[in-house]
Structure formats: structure tokens, C-alpha cells
Amino acid sequence: MGKGTYSRAIAKALGVPHISTGDILRREVAAGTKLGKAVKGYMERGLLVPDSIINLVVEKRLSQPDCARGFVLDGYPRTLSQARFLESRFPVDVAVLLEAPDDVIVERVSGRLVCPRCGATYHVKWKPPKVPGICDVCGAKLVRRRDDDPEVVRERLRLYRETIRPVVDYYRGLGKLLEFDASIDSREGIPLLLEKLKAFRAARPYAQAVHV
Ligand code: AMP
């Protein structure tokens, strides 16, 4: 949904860690850990992992020393209970809502290809590999993540819109919500979002951390 691209770029510009709960969980699944086994079924079906599991994962990661000076979260919180938990343990300065029409999102996400061997990512339309279906870096056969199938994406979106509303209302109520139209090209969008974030933080000098 572009959130990976945006949040990675923002974290880099701010010099803080980029923490994607989806990436953490995918690594656990690939490594076949106890946590990975517990979350695999949810992820393959495009369902949210239970709050009790994901909150522990995030708490552990944000307690590490590299997060002391701030962090950018990607894909968390996704439910009101996650937002309340985060706010009670690691209150954020700003929550960014990236918005785009469903069709734009489905096109972007379902065109993604990933290399199962080295992790390089591609897009059939926007960032195609030199040889169709083959990784430029290591030559392995590219795959589509199971949860990037168009049908799974639509189910994720439906769930997302249903559960995100109370999260958005929560951050709006706290005066921490920044809404951003992410349907423009990210090369234009990233500098624009950075500007908006800086203005947002300047208006709130107590700022310490950022959440996307
Ligand atoms: P993402 O890469 O952020 O789209 O996440 C991929 C999958 O990981 C999601 O479809 C969920 O199954 C799971 N996941 C990631 N973040 C969360 C979260 N905050 N709450 C629940 N499940 C999550």
C-alpha cells in the first residue's frame, strides 16, 4: 500500500529505525519459530494476527536501545486495542494515515514480486526484473507473496477499513493524526510527507517519536 516505501524513506530521513510488524512476522514464519508457526495461518489468509501476540512483538522491539531516540512503525497499530497499548507504553508524536482508492492499492500490491532467496522486491509494472520472473540480484525464480494475491488484498482492505476507523478517530481525538494522500507517485509524495511531518512536529515541540 506504499506504506513500506513511505515509512522506510521517512525513517531514513529522520535517522531512526524502521519497524515493520509485517516484516518481523514474515521473518519468524520463514525461520519456522514458535511465533512464526502461530501467525502463519492468519497471514496467509490476510487476517490480522491477534492483538495479544502482536503487542508483545512490538513491545519487545521498541524496548531495544536503538529505539530510544525515536522510531517509525509500519503497519502497527491496526486496531484500537493496539493503539491504546502503544500509547500506554510508547506514546507517539504523530500517526500518519496514508490514503488511496482501493483499486490503486490492489494494482500496486498484487503486482509485487519477491525473491524467496535474497528478499529483493519488484513490481510487474513499476519495477520489473530485467528477465521476467527472475531475480536480477541472485537469479532465483520470483514469487508473489501469498497475501499479495488480489483476492487476499481485497479481503485485507475490507478488514482494514473496518478496523482502522476507531484507530483513526482515537489519534484524531489525541490531536496526533496526520492524513496524507498517498495515491501520487512516492517520489513526489515522500518529500511532501516529510515537509508535512516537520511542520506537524514543529507545532508540537515535545515530539520524540514518529509512527507511520
Ligand atoms: P503487512 O506487511 O504490514 O501488510 O503485514 C502482513 C500481515 O502481517 C498482515 O496481513 C497481518 O496478518 C500481519 N500483521 C502485520 N502487522 C499487524 C498488526 N499490527 N496487527 C495484526 N496483524 C498484523
Image (tube, grey):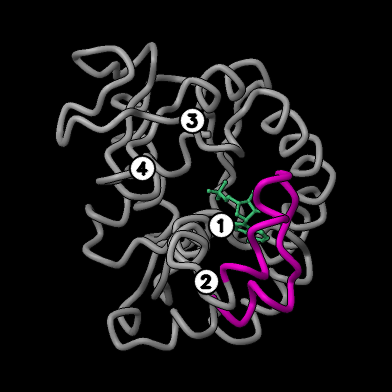
Q: CA distance from mark 4 to mark 1?
A: 32 Å
Tell me which secondary structure the magenta stretch mostly adopts. helix
Task: Identify the amino acid type marked 4.
Answer: Pro
Provide the residue designation for mark 3.
Answer: 144
Of marks 3 and 2, which one's residue comes earlier in the chain? 2
Marks 1 and 2 sit apart, C-alpha to C-alpha, by 7 Å
Q: Is residue 193 above or below residue 67?
A: above
**Where does ligand 1 appear, by image quarter?**
bottom right
Whether 45 is among the magenta residues is yes
Q: Residues within 10 Å of mark 3 (few under 14, many from 20)?
A: some
Callout 2: few (<14), some (14-19), or many (20+) C-alpha neighbours within 10 Å? many
| Element type at mark 3 | loop
Q: Residue 178's x, y, as percent?
A: 56, 48
Q: Which residue is mark 2?
A: 92
Query: Of circles 4 and 1, which is in front?
Result: 4
Tell me what residue is drawn at x 23 percent, y 54 percent.
12
